[in-house]
Image: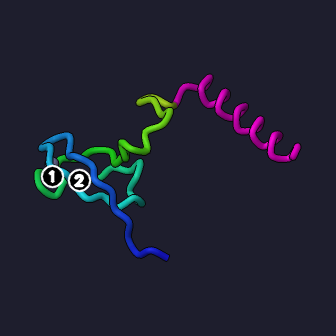
Amino acid sequence: MPSATYYIQPCPVCGRRLQIRVEYLGKQVSCRQCGGVFLAADPTMHRTEPPQPTSELLQRAERLLNSLEVHKLRGR
Ligand SMILES: [Zn+2]
């Protein structure tokens, strides 16, 4: 088991490149250089996550997609 995996994310406050543990992805972290607080999100892992994902319609659509995928897997 790998002990610690980091990725690089520039601090949106001071612009310095920070090493952030991948386990902090999606969580609030604070910059060691300037103390700025921001959300840890790997830009290279950026997929289809809009800033406001709490739309009920979107969640329903996502659930539908997930169930479709499950059906596909079971069909095989
Ligand atoms: Zn900073």
Residue for badge 1 = 35
Magenta residue check for 66 = yes
CB of mark 2 near ligand 1 (< 8 Å): no
For the residue pair 62 and 2, the one nearer the viewer reads as 2
Mark seen at residue 30: 2
CB of mark 1 near ligand 1 (< 8 Å): yes
Question: Which sits earlier in the primary sequence, circle 1 or circle 2?
Answer: 2
Question: Would you place residue 52 above or below residue 10 in this image?
Answer: above
Disc 1: CA contacts within 10 A as few (<14), some (14-19) or many (>=20): few
Taking the spot 87% from the left edge, 46% from the top edge, the residue there is 76
Q: Amino acid at mark 2?
A: Ser
Q: Amino acid at mark 1?
A: Gly
- Corner quadrant of residue 56: top right
Q: Are marks 1 and 2 in contact (CB under 8 Å)?
A: yes
Residue with the most extreme front position: 76
Disc 2: CA contacts within 10 A as few (<14), some (14-19) or many (>=20): some
Taking the spot 33% from the left edge, 56% from the top edge, the residue there is 7
Relative image position of residue 73 (x, y in whole percent): 80, 46
Magenta residue check for 24 = no
Range of residues picked out in magenta: 54-76
